[in-house]
Image (cartoon, grey):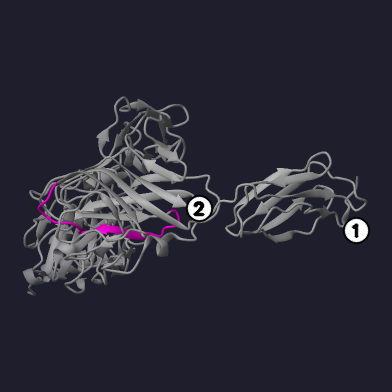
Amino acid sequence: MKKGPGPKFHFSLKLICISLIFVFQIPAISLAYDFRQLPFFAGPTLHQASSSLFTVFPNSTPISIADRAGAATPNGISTPYPSSILVSGMTGTVSDVNVTINGLTTARERDLNFALVSPTGQTLMLMGDAGDLFGTTSVNLTFDDSAAAVVPSTAITTGTYRPTDYLFSGTDSDDFPAPGPGTVTNSAPEGAATLASAFNGIAPNGNWHLYIVDDALGGGASTVSGGWSIDVTTAGGAAATTTTVSSNVNPALTGQTITFTSSTTSGSTVNTGTVSFTDNTVAIAGCSNVPVNASGSATCMTTRPEGRHTITATYNGTASFATSNGSMTQVVNSPTVVNGLQFCNNGGFSIADAGASTVFPSNITVSGLVGVVTSLSVQLNGMNVPRTSNLDFLLVGPGGQAIQIISDTGDSVTAVNPLTLNISDAAASQLPNGTPIVSGTYRPTDINAGAPDTYPAPAPGVFTQAAPSGAATLASTFVATNPNGNWALYAVDDSVGGGATAVTGWCVTFAIPTAAGVSVSGRVRSADGRGIRNATVMITNSQGISRRVMTTAFGGYQFDDLEVGQTYVVTVMSRRYQFTPRVLTITEDLSDVDFVAEPTTTRGE
């Protein structure tokens, strides 16, 4: 009598059957076992759909992260950037997300930042500036809201942690270069976002992206040898929804009423349920549980203080429709006060010890100036400073030109109150180094003691530096640029100790060429000498700025207050006639600048 197959044969057959499920991706079989516990789970092709069980989607492709190259260069980025995982076949909406990083090796884990971006654009900092500066080898990290602890600020070991984002210092630069996310919601302790608050309620299917950057110099490249995976759990009882939020005015002014409007859809308009609005995760008074109207919208009317605000509209869900949320950045500026060629923001701000300013950036809006910048100066008013050597100030013009005008000047022991600084290229001296600062006028000064200076997003990662660290001046940075637009001042305290700094306001003062009384005038005539009324005459300077006037009943026109030495193009537009443009370089008043219609192009009376 033949013996039946032994226990080893049955065990092998079981392994073969389970392996076939992976190889052929049979979607009809729902398994309640956590396959991550099996020793052979490594397949990047597991896409088993289930509305009640989690599904693991891996990408085992190794990831390398470049060290940041220099102080004036963007953060080092990963290759690939991003690393992506396609989630497909899931039903319902997300009810839980966990992420695992496999095989992290780095000399300085504190330099690294990991951001997760969903298919619909929601973001979360999984890990930022955690660990220490002594390195890890082949560490596996799982991020789970239900974990017992955050990632430590000491040596990191393999384990499961809650998403963790530390604000390491006032110069912490957790920005992700394009195509990375412009803004990332911060997990604790810097923020309050979680995997659940960021992703629960959204549609799961599509590409999930992992962006990794190195935000500090030193340590060299890092690797994630085993790639990463994402575990997605869905709730299938409610239809997925998408919520967006917009503002009726952005930027707005302090004291100005802003209307935020949400829109929630699920294939079509969702006209039931409520929406709650938050500002930087804090509920906006009077804007919680706002009923959705027949158009699928809810509104929140409010005023906001000066600064940048992350406004989030959360659809709270019903039995039929799942929750979802959308966010936007609202900018609120203090009104610009104009006195001649001086433009001021008198709203004031404070700078946290080892942190950034509460209004980041503080903005001044310049408008109505003719011509280009020939020189400018910057004034910082009413400063109460415990340690001047801790402060850095970055000025950014409307065209994106940027210069660090003050860095690490003065000393670390002398508190100054009040202090008013006027920064001008024409000053006799720079700010002192190692001795107390007194109110006065100084040239831009960048001591740049210690590590290179960086500024958190949305500040630019690249900027010029004044002497002695560099050679940039206000003139070399801004002369010949258009002064009109938004001027931004970013301020940080880059060292621990001393306490907060207060600034009552700041101003920028321009020198712009003026030419009062210099004008261009003339007549627009037909070929037989008749004046043509209501023709449009346009004059455009070399910066592309145009002015227009209509001709009088006799065809006359005139432009006043034009800039001496400027080159202009004058064109005439008429429904019935064509004219040849004229190029003028103006050194004095010009009259009789006439335009005669081309006789062969008359289009009819």
Q: Position of residue 44 (x, y in %)?
A: 27, 66
Circle 1 residue:
600
> Is residue 406 shown above or below 498?
below
Residue 47 seen in render? no
In the rendered structure, does residue 554 fall within the stretch colored magenta?
no
Name the one closer to the observer, 88 or 501.
501
Q: Amino acid at mark 2?
A: Ile
Name the one closer to the observer, 167 or 123.
167
> Is residue 82 shown above or below 412?
below
- The mark that comes first in sequence, 1 or 2, is 2
- What secondary structure prevails in the magenta region? loop
Name the one closer to the observer, 96 or 69.
69
Q: Name the residue located 25 percent from the left edge and 72 percent from the top edge.
A: 66
Q: Which quarter of the picture shows residue 143?
A: bottom left
Circle 2 residue:
512
Q: Which quarter of the picture shows residue 581?
A: bottom right
Residue bounds of the magenta highlight:
398-415
- Kindly identify which numbered label has been placed on residue 389: none
